Image (cartoon, rainbow, N blue to C red):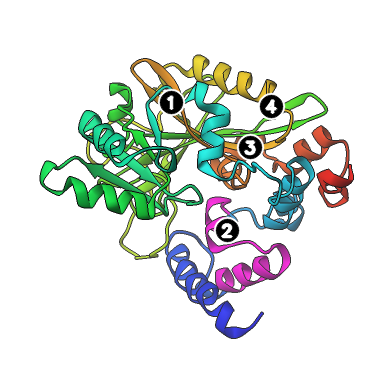
Amino acid sequence: MRLRNAWPYIRGAWRAARKQATRSDRSHLDLFFDMMRCKFKYGSTVSNYLMFNFTEYTDPAFRDQYVYIKDWIKLVNALNPPKTTPGYIQDKVIAYKRYKKYFFRDVLIVAESSDDEIHSFLEDKETVFAKDAMGYAGVGIEKITYDAQTIDETVARIREHYDMLEEEIIQHPLLDTVSPNAVASFRFTFLKDKGKILMFPLSVRIALFDDVDIIKVGQSSSCVAVDEEGYFISQAVVNDSVFDLNFETRYDFHPITGAAISDGSFQVPYFKEMVDMMMEIMEGEDEYGHMGWDVAVSEMGPCVIEGNPWGSYDFYQYYDHVKRVNQGIRPTIEAFMGCKIDDLPKKADR
C-alpha cells in the first residue's frame, strides 16, 4: 500500500484510537497499532473496528469469525451474476422495474417521460426524491420541492442529472419519534442458495439531529439493532467519522424527541408484514442470491426503498448483534453455504 493511499486510514485510525483510549482501559498507541494490524490482516476499515467493537473483542480467533470485505466480495460473486450481465439490478431503474410491486408509491422514469410529464409529476407531488440510477450510499440523491417560478430550470436539471423521480415516503408516525428528520431505513440482508434462504440480523438507520438523507454516512445517521420480534435492542450507534473527543456516539434516548431507544420497549410497526414481504421477494428471486434491501414503513405498511446486490457487510455484524450469540457471522454463513467462504467459486463457475 502506497503511503499516499494509506494516509487517510492512518489519520483516521490515529484519531479513532485517541478517542477510544478515553473510553477504555487500552492506550492510544495500543489501539492505533491494533487498528493497523486489522487493516493488514483483514482489510478492515476504522469503522469496522469500531462497529464490531474490536476495542473489547481482542481475541484473534473471535475476530476470525467475522466477515470482511474480501469475504463479502466472494459471497456476492458466488451468488449473483457478474456486473456486466445485461439488466444488472445495481441500476436503480432496472431494479425498480423488477420489484415495482413492492414500492407502493409513484415513480417516474425520466428517460421515458416528456418535460410536461416531469412538470406534472412535480406539481402533483410537491416534494419528490430525484435519483441517479447508479448512485450509492446517498450520492446522487436530491430532495426537490415544487416551485412554479423555477419549474423549467428544475425540469432541465432533472433531465441532465437524474434518472428517476420518486414520491416522498411519509413514514409511520411512531417511527417519527425515533427518526424525526428522515425516514427510518431498515436494512435486510439475505443469502439464497439452492432454494434455501438465510436472513441476517436486522438493523435500522435513524436520523439523530439534522434533516438528512438517511442513506448518507454522517454524524446524524446512526444504527440500531432490531431483534426477531421487531424490538429495538441496542443504543443508537453513530458511524463516527470525525472522532471529536466531545462527540457522543451512542444514545439511549433520541436527542430531539427523548424517545427511549435501547431499553427494549420500542417495537417497529408492521414488523411481521415487513418480514413477510421481504421473504416473499426472496422466495421469488432466483437470479440474485445476495441482496441488501432498504425498507421503510408508512401508515399503510412496509415499502421497498431500494434493493442492492452489493448490500454491505457491516449492518448484520454490529457489536450489539454479535454479543447476543457471542459468535461472529462467518460460521453461520459457511454452514448455510456448505463450504468455506474462501472456497466459493464465482456463480458463473458453479
Gap in Å between the C-alphas at discs 3 and 1?
28 Å
Gap in Å between the C-alphas at discs 1 and 2?
25 Å
Front one among 301 and 110 = 110
Earlier-in-chain disc, 4 versus 3: 4
Foreground disc of the pair 4, 1: 4
Residue 250 is a magenta residue: no
Please report the bounds of the magenta region as a residue range: 30-53
Q: Residue 49 got which mark? A: 2
Determine contact: label 4, label 1, CB under 8 Å.
no
Earlier-in-chain disc, 4 versus 1: 1
Foreground disc of the pair 3, 1: 3
Foreground disc of the pair 1, 2: 2
Occupied quadrant, residue 121: top left
Q: Residue at x 41, y 53 (%)?
A: 140
The extreme bottom residue here reads 3
Question: Residue 181's spot in the image, x, y percent?
Answer: 26, 39
Question: Residue 2's spot in the image, x, y percent?
Answer: 63, 83
Give the residue at mark 4.
285
